[in-house]
Amino acid sequence: MLQFETLKNDPSSHARRGKLTLNHGVVQTPIFMPVGTYGTVKGVMPRSLEEMGAQIILGNTFHLWMRPGLDIMQSFGGLHGFEKWNKPILTDSGGFQVWSLGAMRKITEEGVHFASPVNGDKLFMSPEVSMQIQTTLNSDIVMQLDECTPYETKGHLTTEAEARKSMEMSRRWAQRSKDEFARLENPNALFGIVQGGMFENLRQESLEALVEMDFPGYAVGGVSVGEPKDLMLQIMAHTPHRLPAHKPRYLMGVGTPEDLVQGVADGVDMFDCVMPTRNARNGTIFTRYGDLKLRNARHKTDHQPIDTTCTCHACAGSSGVSWDQGGRDGFSRAYLHHLDRCGEMLGPMLTTIHNLHYYLNLMQEVRNALDTGTFAAFRAQFKADRARGV
């Protein structure tokens, strides 16, 4: 089941405020979706995710197929029961992970033959297999199997002819995914994925073909795969707002806080990215006033929290009162710097909580601005704040 309703449109851009109803709950859009690759968002308890406002999370089809395997997933009735998350889940198709295997895989029209990175077993992923796996996972949103068109191929930039060949195969795989999804009588929702590399004409062809197939929702894939930032922004500006207005639009694997706000302006409803969690584990923290490099020596004696305006557990402690509002229960930059230097696991747990809270709160602020008709002013203030520096 999927129902999507546009609640408000921003007159200054392609941004819109929406409500997405899925089998496991309602999602207010625009939304950022934390990534839980192996059935967990690394270092974060499900309860903490709920407390920080996560409405929907991701699972990774490829990795969950490898471990723990479909028999175990089936015994729990799917991913929700296995990881104890009762809100919506989106699963990717596994295509990006297979594509990332490089020399370990061979792509054909039928699907992808590859060696398991876990034990070396010879395996095969096809549109039909991906649909079967995702049906077992019982995710609320299922993604078609596609080929992620690279920016570079064997040391040279991907040509238009190469991008076309890849896009056209993804288009055929979209139809096969749709047919198998229907055969399995999967009660959830299947999204088609727009491909075409950095070529707007190919993106348009892919888009039109997928719209004709009438998917419940659509994603823009094949961005943030090594291309220069200006080309990514070009595709973001071109594609999302051309997708059907009455269906949700998802930009896959993007990105920075600036990318999210720009993506909303370009008409995107849904985002995911490993950046907030991965960067947190490596000492890069997102704040209202720019990015903070926790490992810098200047933080060794700093009594301030990560972000003085933030109400997450790392910054405000159990009181939920930010430093700027008089709270002093949060953890200092000096303490977090110390944990990072000592390799203590509490450090990345707290920084991950902060980064995810920042992303989710940013999207809440975006939704509030769209609700009140102040999105243009919000964008201007957001840019000024981020440029100020911590």
Image (tube, helix red, strand yellow):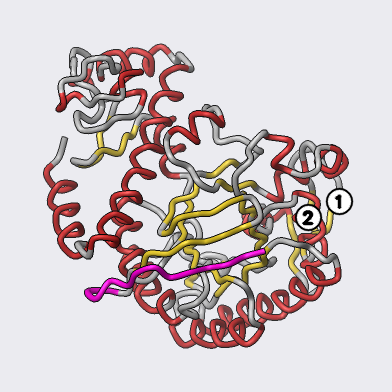
Q: What's the residue at 36%, 24% (across, down)?
A: 313
Q: Is residue 146 magenta?
A: no
Neighbour tally class for label 1: few under 14, some 14-19, many 20 plus, Cα within 10 Å: few
Label 1 amino acid? Lys
* Image spot of residue 212 (x, y percent): 62, 87
Residue that label 2 marks: 114
Q: Position of residue 142 (x, y in %)?
A: 67, 60
Image quarter where the N terminus lies is: bottom right
The percent coordinates of residue 77 (x first, y second) are 81, 43
Q: Is residue 249 left or right of residue 355?
A: right
Tag 1 residue = 122
Position of the C terminus, as image quadrant, is top left
Magenta stretch, residue numbers: 1-13
Q: Which mark is residue 141?
A: none
Question: Would you place residue 384 above or below residue 117 in this image?
Answer: below
Q: Give the residue drawn at x 60%, y 78%.
A: 167
- Label pair 1/2, CB-CB below 8 angstroms: yes
Q: Name which quarter of the figure residue 330 lies in.
A: top left
- Type of residue at label 2? Phe
- Residue 38, percent from left and from top: 65, 38
